[in-house]
Amino acid sequence: MDELKSRYRKAVFLWIEMVFSIFVYAFVVEIMKMNSAFLRATSPLQEGGMPVFLLLGFAIMTFFLIKHIHNQILSGKSSGNPAGSKIPLSPKIAKLLKASLVSNAICESVAIYGLILFVLNKNPFDFYIFMVLSLFYFAFTFPRYAQWEEWIQETERKGSSGVLAPR
Protein backbone atom coordinates (compact mmCIF):
# COMPACT_ATOMS: atom_id res chain seq x y z
CA MET A 1 0.00 0.00 0.00
CA ASP A 2 3.02 2.29 0.14
CA GLU A 3 2.99 2.38 -3.64
CA LEU A 4 -0.70 3.35 -3.57
CA LYS A 5 0.01 6.24 -1.18
CA SER A 6 2.95 7.38 -3.27
CA ARG A 7 0.95 7.36 -6.52
CA TYR A 8 -1.98 9.02 -4.78
CA ARG A 9 0.28 11.85 -3.59
CA LYS A 10 1.55 12.19 -7.15
CA ALA A 11 -2.05 12.39 -8.44
CA VAL A 12 -2.91 15.10 -5.89
CA PHE A 13 0.23 17.05 -6.80
CA LEU A 14 -0.65 16.85 -10.51
CA TRP A 15 -4.19 17.96 -9.69
CA ILE A 16 -2.85 20.99 -7.82
CA GLU A 17 -0.50 21.85 -10.68
CA MET A 18 -3.28 21.69 -13.22
CA VAL A 19 -5.63 23.82 -11.11
CA PHE A 20 -2.81 26.33 -10.64
CA SER A 21 -2.38 26.51 -14.42
CA ILE A 22 -5.95 27.79 -14.72
CA PHE A 23 -5.02 30.71 -12.49
CA VAL A 24 -1.99 31.30 -14.71
CA TYR A 25 -4.42 31.53 -17.65
CA ALA A 26 -6.45 34.09 -15.67
CA PHE A 27 -3.27 36.09 -15.10
CA VAL A 28 -2.56 35.97 -18.84
CA VAL A 29 -6.10 37.19 -19.56
CA GLU A 30 -5.65 40.10 -17.17
CA ILE A 31 -2.30 41.04 -18.73
CA MET A 32 -3.76 40.85 -22.24
CA LYS A 33 -6.73 43.00 -21.16
CA MET A 34 -4.29 45.79 -20.32
CA ASN A 35 -2.79 45.70 -23.82
CA SER A 36 -4.75 48.27 -25.79
CA ALA A 37 -3.31 47.08 -29.11
CA PHE A 38 -4.69 43.59 -28.42
CA LEU A 39 -8.12 44.95 -27.55
CA ARG A 40 -8.25 47.19 -30.66
CA ALA A 41 -7.46 44.33 -33.02
CA THR A 42 -10.60 43.17 -34.78
CA SER A 43 -11.82 39.63 -34.90
CA PRO A 44 -14.48 38.09 -37.13
CA LEU A 45 -16.01 36.47 -34.04
CA GLN A 46 -16.37 39.62 -31.94
CA GLU A 47 -19.93 40.31 -33.03
CA GLY A 48 -21.31 36.76 -33.15
CA GLY A 49 -22.13 34.75 -30.04
CA MET A 50 -22.53 31.39 -31.78
CA PRO A 51 -19.02 30.01 -31.00
CA VAL A 52 -19.50 30.90 -27.33
CA PHE A 53 -22.71 28.89 -27.08
CA LEU A 54 -21.30 25.98 -29.07
CA LEU A 55 -18.22 25.74 -26.86
CA LEU A 56 -20.31 26.22 -23.73
CA GLY A 57 -22.55 23.33 -24.80
CA PHE A 58 -19.50 21.19 -25.49
CA ALA A 59 -17.99 22.17 -22.13
CA ILE A 60 -21.16 21.08 -20.34
CA MET A 61 -21.14 17.75 -22.21
CA THR A 62 -17.51 17.39 -21.12
CA PHE A 63 -18.75 16.78 -17.57
CA PHE A 64 -20.25 13.48 -18.68
CA LEU A 65 -17.26 12.72 -20.90
CA ILE A 66 -14.96 12.93 -17.87
CA LYS A 67 -16.96 10.32 -15.99
CA HIS A 68 -17.22 8.03 -19.03
CA ILE A 69 -13.51 8.12 -19.89
CA HIS A 70 -12.56 7.66 -16.23
CA ASN A 71 -14.72 4.54 -16.08
CA GLN A 72 -13.32 3.25 -19.39
CA ILE A 73 -9.75 3.53 -18.14
CA LEU A 74 -10.49 1.82 -14.84
CA SER A 75 -12.55 -0.94 -16.43
CA GLY A 76 -9.64 -1.86 -18.68
CA LYS A 77 -11.65 -1.44 -21.88
CA SER A 78 -9.23 1.20 -23.09
CA SER A 79 -6.15 -0.93 -22.40
CA GLY A 80 -7.36 -4.28 -23.68
CA ASN A 81 -7.41 -6.15 -20.33
CA PRO A 82 -9.96 -8.97 -20.22
CA ALA A 83 -12.78 -8.31 -17.76
CA GLY A 84 -12.12 -11.32 -15.52
CA SER A 85 -8.33 -11.26 -15.47
CA LYS A 86 -6.20 -11.08 -12.32
CA ILE A 87 -4.10 -7.93 -12.57
CA PRO A 88 -1.17 -7.34 -10.20
CA LEU A 89 -1.43 -4.38 -7.81
CA SER A 90 1.09 -2.12 -9.55
CA PRO A 91 -0.76 -1.94 -12.91
CA LYS A 92 -4.00 -1.27 -11.03
CA ILE A 93 -2.41 1.67 -9.27
CA ALA A 94 -1.06 2.89 -12.61
CA LYS A 95 -4.62 2.75 -13.97
CA LEU A 96 -5.84 4.92 -11.11
CA LEU A 97 -3.10 7.47 -11.76
CA LYS A 98 -3.78 7.43 -15.51
CA ALA A 99 -7.53 7.86 -14.98
CA SER A 100 -6.88 10.78 -12.64
CA LEU A 101 -4.47 12.47 -15.03
CA VAL A 102 -6.74 12.08 -18.06
CA SER A 103 -9.73 13.38 -16.08
CA ASN A 104 -7.68 16.40 -14.98
CA ALA A 105 -6.58 17.11 -18.53
CA ILE A 106 -10.18 17.10 -19.71
CA CYS A 107 -11.12 19.46 -16.85
CA GLU A 108 -8.33 21.82 -17.86
CA SER A 109 -9.42 21.75 -21.50
CA VAL A 110 -12.61 23.58 -20.51
CA ALA A 111 -10.54 26.55 -19.26
CA ILE A 112 -8.54 26.42 -22.47
CA TYR A 113 -11.78 26.77 -24.46
CA GLY A 114 -12.41 29.97 -22.52
CA LEU A 115 -8.90 31.22 -23.16
CA ILE A 116 -9.32 30.62 -26.88
CA LEU A 117 -12.67 32.45 -26.85
CA PHE A 118 -11.07 35.37 -25.04
CA VAL A 119 -8.34 35.62 -27.66
CA LEU A 120 -10.93 35.50 -30.44
CA ASN A 121 -13.66 37.69 -28.89
CA LYS A 122 -11.57 39.98 -26.65
CA ASN A 123 -14.20 39.46 -23.93
CA PRO A 124 -12.67 38.36 -20.60
CA PHE A 125 -16.12 37.31 -19.33
CA ASP A 126 -16.02 34.41 -21.82
CA PHE A 127 -12.84 33.12 -20.21
CA TYR A 128 -14.14 33.49 -16.65
CA ILE A 129 -17.30 31.51 -17.39
CA PHE A 130 -15.20 28.60 -18.64
CA MET A 131 -12.71 29.02 -15.80
CA VAL A 132 -15.45 28.63 -13.18
CA LEU A 133 -16.84 25.62 -15.02
CA SER A 134 -13.37 24.08 -15.19
CA LEU A 135 -12.76 24.65 -11.48
CA PHE A 136 -16.11 23.00 -10.72
CA TYR A 137 -15.03 19.96 -12.78
CA PHE A 138 -11.71 19.89 -10.95
CA ALA A 139 -13.52 19.89 -7.61
CA PHE A 140 -15.62 16.98 -8.83
CA THR A 141 -12.59 14.95 -9.97
CA PHE A 142 -10.29 15.56 -7.01
CA PRO A 143 -8.58 12.22 -6.32
CA ARG A 144 -9.76 10.73 -3.04
CA TYR A 145 -7.60 8.17 -1.30
CA ALA A 146 -10.59 6.32 0.15
CA GLN A 147 -11.95 5.79 -3.37
CA TRP A 148 -8.58 4.54 -4.57
CA GLU A 149 -8.38 2.04 -1.69
CA GLU A 150 -11.98 0.98 -2.24
CA TRP A 151 -11.38 0.40 -5.96
CA ILE A 152 -8.22 -1.65 -5.27
CA GLN A 153 -10.02 -3.76 -2.65
CA GLU A 154 -13.02 -4.23 -4.91
CA THR A 155 -10.88 -5.42 -7.81
CA GLU A 156 -8.96 -7.75 -5.49
CA ARG A 157 -12.23 -9.20 -4.19
CA LYS A 158 -13.80 -9.64 -7.61
CA GLY A 159 -10.62 -10.63 -9.40
CA SER A 160 -11.44 -8.13 -12.14
CA SER A 161 -10.53 -4.62 -13.10
CA GLY A 162 -13.88 -3.16 -11.94
CA VAL A 163 -15.17 0.37 -12.29
CA LEU A 164 -15.35 3.06 -9.65
CA ALA A 165 -16.75 6.35 -10.87
CA PRO A 166 -15.38 9.64 -9.54
CA ARG A 167 -17.56 11.29 -6.93
Image (spheres, rainbow, N blue to C red):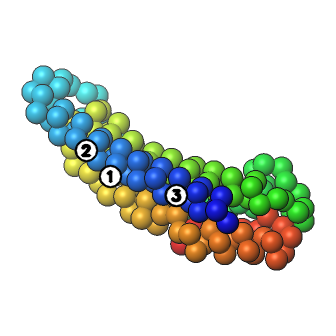
Is residue 69 something one can see in this rendering? no
Question: Mark 2 vs mark 3: which is more N-terminal?
Answer: 3
- In the rendered image, which residue does mark 2 sit on? 26
Q: Position of residue 101 (x, y in %)?
A: 56, 50
Where disc 3 sits, the SS reads helix
- In the rendered image, which residue does mark 1 sit on? 131
The amino acid at mark 1 is Met
Q: Is residue 23 above or below residue 147?
A: above
Q: Is residue 105 above or below residue 162?
A: above
Residue 114, by quadrant, is top left
Foreground pick, 100 / 90: 90
Where disc 2 sits, the SS reads helix
Q: Residue at x 46, y 53 (%)?
A: 13
Question: Mark 2 vs mark 1: which is more N-terminal?
Answer: 2
Foreground pick, 147 / 74: 147
Estimate how packed mark 3 is, as few (under 14), some (14 to 19) or many (20 or more) residues with alpha carbons within 10 Å: some
The answer to whether mark 1 and mark 3 are in CB contact below 8 A is: no
Q: Residue at x 58, y 49 (%)?
A: 102
- In three-dimensional space, the C-alpha distance between marks 2 and 3, rounded to whole angstroms, equals 26 Å
Q: Residue at x 84, y 59 (%)?
A: 87
The answer to whether mark 2 and mark 1 are in CB contact below 8 A is: yes
Q: Position of residue 41 (x, y in %)?
A: 18, 23
Estimate how packed mark 1 is, as few (under 14), some (14 to 19) or many (20 or more) residues with alpha carbons within 10 Å: many
Quarter placement of the C terminus? bottom right
- In three-dimensional space, the C-alpha distance between marks 2 and 1, rounded to whole angstroms, equals 8 Å
- In the rendered image, which residue does mark 3 sit on? 9
Q: Position of residue 53 (x, y in %)?
A: 37, 50
Q: Residue at x 82, y 77 (%)?
A: 157
Quarter placement of the N terminus? bottom right
